[in-house]
Amino acid sequence: MTHATTALLLTAPIAVPLATSAAHAATGLRGVRPYRRAHAPRHSAALAHRPPPPRTPAEPVRTTGATAAAGGPATLTGGPPAAPPGPPPFATDGPPAAPPFATGTDTVARPLGTWLGLVSPATILFCGAALAATVPDRGPVTAYGRLLRADALTVWLLLAVGAVAALACAANPAHLAHERADAGAARRYNLLVHAFLAAMSAAVLAANLGVLWIAIEATTIVTAFLVGHRRTRASVEAAWKYVVICSAGIALAFLGTVLIYYAARQAGISEASALDWPTLAAHADRLDPAVTRLAMSLIVLGFGAKAGLAPLHAWLPDAHSQAPAPVSALMSGVLLSVAFAGLLRYKVIADAALGTGYTRTLLAGAALLTLALAAILLLAQRDYKRMLAYSSMEHMSLIALGTAIGTPLAVSAALLHIAGHGLAKTVAFCASGHILRIRRTARIGRVRGLLAEAPALGTTFGLAVVALLGLPPFSLFASELGLARAGFAAGHGKVVAVALVLTLVSFAALVTRTARMVLGPPPEPEAVADGPVRLGAAAAAPLVTGLVAAAALGMATGPLTRLLSAAGEIIGRH
């Protein structure tokens, strides 16, 4: 591979998303075409419209004689006149009840064409695949004076980012059609999504720890606007909570990075290389242990906050439940993992400087605390998007536990868990967005009989949860089995046993709540009198593709086996 080819493969995952983002900023929306209501409001989960839920007995209705005679709207006892029949107003627990772009003969604005949104993920996937073909055999490659670098760990994460982004961006048109109707909001949404992909790719490819920190901070800034995209009170509050907590965490990580720089300079490493990760990893035994210990504590807290680990985890359920479904998929599927990958880079340095015991204790403690909180909160959860968010905490704690165990098998299993969780969680969040538009509520208790009402949607959502439960043939089964085997083999049986018990509690909570949503008759039998809601080929394609990929990865990693083993060796050999 020539130097020019290497530079292109390392640059394109950042440059192409930035160029796409700039294209949205410069040209706005194009390709407007008519979209009539008669074309399928009943045959697409993304456009399905349901009547308001039936009135409960606690809400008596009375009509005045004049109103009843005229056929006018009824009025509630002791209240103002009821709204005329039609979609309910903008609710606090979901998007607008009726699709704002599908009214009569109104037109639907298509942002630059549906396919442009897939250019960035396709580029990231292609570059990751090209690097995967050479890096395991020839070793790491660099570009621009070692500013960008790709080793096996980088390539594995790049493939995960590309795969999850492809599924989420393929689902974007169906979800975006129901967001805010103005063209400016849609343009900002697409601009921010591709800038988000560029920032994550930069964080994965950065060889300098300072650039890594800047890229992860950039993801915070970009996603804050995406979390508050709907501009409801709940979404804006979630965005502010996300900014405050994650900025505090990133500030702690910045202090840890400064301390690492100080220790490197005191150890005689040049100013230009004091934050270069390969240089630090090679000379970590010369770092001051006391300074490195303090730095690692701050970094675990800081990057752990961005990865959804306790104690700075409170932003995660609010942000994931309020963001648009594809954004929730990106945040849960890969943003948490990219932040944790930054922590892995520092772990290599700390293990060489301090031994493995100190970092293992920090990560195992954070993992068990996060797992316990996730299990308890899942038991009490009544909102299915927040349920998926707490499931993300559970899986990130298992990834942290595998990293704490630290053997090559455990780290490889944790990396496999990153990929499997990203695929399954993307399908689950995108499916939840369709459920939200069909039922117009995020409350688990108000969603029943999905299999009867929308068979394809109920099936994909149920299978996504099955994948998240770690059942075969999906990849999370293989990764969790590998984590358990590695933990017992390394002599950490007690910690693994506690983690398994807490995981079983989470398992029971997810099974109970998902069964209520998927099984049984729908709450409004008349809603399916004229046939079930059809998901539509365009909306179903990313969901089915994600499930197939998660199952294939669980049965055999195929050509990715060497890459996964090499990535595990980078972290586990220390």
Image (cartoon, rainbow, N blue to C red):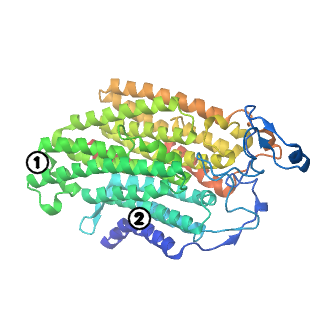
Q: What residue is shown with label 2?
A: 13
Q: Residue furthest right?
A: 69
Name the residue: 53% across, 64% down.
118
Dot 1: what SS?
A: helix
Which is nearer the eye, 347 or 331?
331
Give amino acid for label 2: Pro
Of callouts 1 and 2, which one flags the residue occurring earlier in the amino acid sequence?
2
Q: What residue is shown with label 1?
A: 286
Quarter of the image where one finds residue 279: bottom left
Name the residue: 82% across, 38% down.
62
Tag 1 and tag 2, C-beta contact below 8 Å: no
Q: Up-down: is 229 above or below 451?
A: below
Spot occupied by residue 440 in the image (x, y as percentages of width and height): 66, 46
Give the CA separation, mark 1 to mark 2: 35 Å
Name the residue: 60% across, 74% down.
30
**In the image, 555: left or right of 45?**
left
